[in-house]
Image: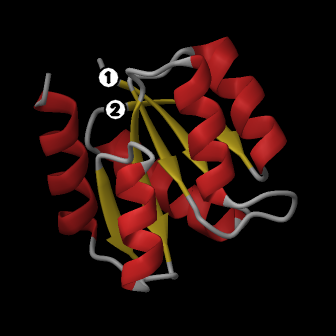
Amino acid sequence: MKRILIVDDSFYMRTLLKNMLSDAGYEVVGEAPNGQTALELAKETKPDLITLDVILPDNTGLDVLKGIKAEQPDMKVIIVSAVGQEVIVNEAMEYGAKSYIVKPFSEEKVLEVVSKVLSED
């Protein structure tokens, strides 16, 4: 079973993603409401994949992405954010994000991207 860490400052969004991913057979190993917790949980839980929001209360998702990649270069990260500007999307991909999902999203889209990213080597 693939293990996923969800990072989003919105409790509603974390719950929505958790239910979606759990129902699809993934194990959600943690939820982080901010960047600091995200970095700690990424180290502790060693998930197969992290979903990461760009707007966090203490940090930007891009900084968190850089921090995660510095510690765990092979970590698979999918950005899930309402921020869809091309500049941000491109920056996220440059820093090592595997994919970028813009909110609002459909369950099908999330599960398709998660499955695709997890099946990549």
Q: Is residue 23 left or right of residue 80?
A: left
Kind of residue at disc 1: Lys
Q: Which mark is residue 33?
A: none
Up the image or down, 101 lies above or below 72; here it is below
Q: x, y percentage for residue 99?
A: 29, 55
Mark 2–mark 1 Cα distance, whole angstroms, equals 5 Å
Q: Residue at x 45, y 47 (%)?
A: 95
Q: Is residue 63 left or right of residue 15?
A: right
Q: Residue at x 50, y 63 (%)?
A: 16
Label 2: which secondary element: loop
The residue lying furthest to the right in this view is 58
Circle 2/circle 1 CB separation < 8 Å: yes
Q: Pointer 1: residues within 10 angstroms few (<14), some, or many (20+)?
A: few
Kind of residue at disc 2: Tyr
Residue labelled with disc 1 = 2
Label 1: which secondary element: loop
Residue labelled with disc 2 = 26
Name the one closer to the observer, 115 or 98.
Answer: 98
Q: Is residue 40 left or right of residue 98?
A: right
Name the one closer to the observer, 49 or 93.
Answer: 93
Q: Pointer 2: residues within 10 angstroms few (<14), some, or many (20+)?
A: some
Quadrant of the drawing holding the C terminus: top left
- Is residue 40 at all visible to an observer of this figure? yes
Q: x, y percentage for residue 116?
A: 13, 43
Counting residues from the start of the chain, the first of labels 2 and 1 encountered is: 1
Q: Residue at x 58, y 58 (%)?
A: 15
Q: x, y percentage for residue 103?
A: 43, 80
